[in-house]
Image (cartoon, grey):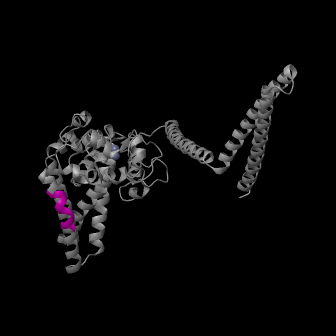
Amino acid sequence: MTSRTQIENPTPKRSIVWSNAAFLTLTPPAAIITATWYAVSVGITWIEVTACVALWIVVGLSVTAGYHRLFSHRAYQASFPVRLFFALFGAAAWENSIIAWAAAHRFHHRHVDSQDDPYNPQEGFWYSHMGWIMVEGSKHDDTSNVPDLWKDPICRWQHKYYLAVSTVTNLAITIGLGLITGRMLGMFIFALLVRVVLTHHFTFLINSAAHIWGSQRWSTAHSAKDNWFLSFFTFGEGYHNYHHSFQADYRNGALWYNWDPSKWLIWLLSRLGLAQDLRRSHVDIRLQRLFAEAQRQFSERFDSLEEAFNEFRERAQTAMSESPLSQLRQQFASAEERCEQTLEELKAVRSKWQATLRTGGNRLPESRNLKRQLKRTHRQARSAQREWQRLGQAYLATAAATVHA
Ligand SMILES: [Zn+2]
Ligand SMILES: [Zn+2]
């Protein structure tokens, strides 16, 4: 599919967005180097680990339950404080404003696997993972598909002051944690740098890995896959085949045992009166989709099996027609024809000879000639029958040997 898409629509030349490219290229090695240096020279304690993991969870959930399910898909309604919380802590992920994020994401769902998909998985792992952020894309500045978000004052404000909001939130959290714990440097490395890299790449994996590895029980109309392993690191976003099939559902892991902390958070918010109108796919539509997909897969497998069976039958027929047994059977049939032919000839000659006998007796030259011809044809008919007998016996013996082999 990749090669066909690329041949039909060659990948366009895209100019690089240097600020994004530099940020995404430099932060991972900076995080590894500074974290290693800190571990060796200062020492990592549970404080750095807890701060990093806790913030990764808070910021990550703000992206998955907020940016993604609330703002991009309108899978539920949330109260003002919840929307503000997601706008602030989601900005701390440094994954752009809600409006820009949701616009790209809605284009992804609408044009999935095509050139109008901002993170088109058909362009390979790295492009869909982070390459698309580093280059100009046709849909990058297009926010025409989020008119609802433009009406939301929180989204408008966050979009307008995105750089300031993301920077101030990150600095406020980091400096605040540094003052509380007395480990300011550790917080800058683990609560900020390492956590930003973790949040980035676990989000990115949904656009790359979740379109490559996993199962497709809900639909094969798109490349999205269900991957429970990925869900452990992405707050439930790994059930991506389900999500692309039922994008308005507030759950990505629809079954109660599917690891989906984002859905549990949304459910908890609804119990606390902070979220409403949680949308779920209907049970009959889900079952119908499962049935249709299984039906399609069965029919595909049946067709390919039938094709393989037809090929096998043709090969077997060719092999049979070329086998010594089949050749003997054909020779036997020809010998049988020859027997019938010689018998006919013998009968014709004998009739003629008898006719000459009745008219002129035994001494006529024609009668003598016919008598000689009669003897010759008789020999030929007997010889044809002996050959036919021999071939018949040979066929029976070969057939018996083949069957009992
Ligand atoms: Zn996707
Ligand atoms: Zn989505």
Examine the structure image and report whether residue 372 is included in the region drawn in magenta. Answer: no
Part of the protein shown in magenta? 22-31
Please provide percent x and percent y for residue 297: 51, 42
| Residue 251 visible | no
- Up/down of 101 relative to 188, above or below: above
Q: Quadrant of the N terminus?
A: top left
Please provide percent x and percent y for residue 151: 23, 34
As drawn, is 376 to the left or to the right of 160? Answer: right
* Residue 9 lies in quadrant: top left
Residue at figure coordinates x 31%, y 38% from the top left? 111
How many numbered marks does the figure carry? Answer: 0
Please provide percent x and percent y for residue 76: 37, 40
Q: Specify the farthest residue to the bottom.
A: 41
Q: Front-most of 319 and 375?
A: 375
Residue at figure coordinates x 22%, y 69% from the top left? 32
* Residue 354 lies in quadrant: top right
Please provide percent x and percent y for residue 302: 55, 42
Q: Front-most of 336 and 324?
A: 336
Q: Quadrant of the C terminus?
A: bottom right
| Residue 123 visible | yes
Q: Front-most of 91 and 108?
A: 108
As drawn, is 162 to the left or to the right of 201? Answer: left
**Predominant secondary structure in magenta?**
helix
- Up/down of 352 relative to 164, above or below: above
As drawn, is 330 to the left or to the right of 27? Answer: right
Examine the structure image and report whether residue 30 is included in the region drawn in magenta. Answer: yes
Q: Specify the farthest residue to the top.
A: 359
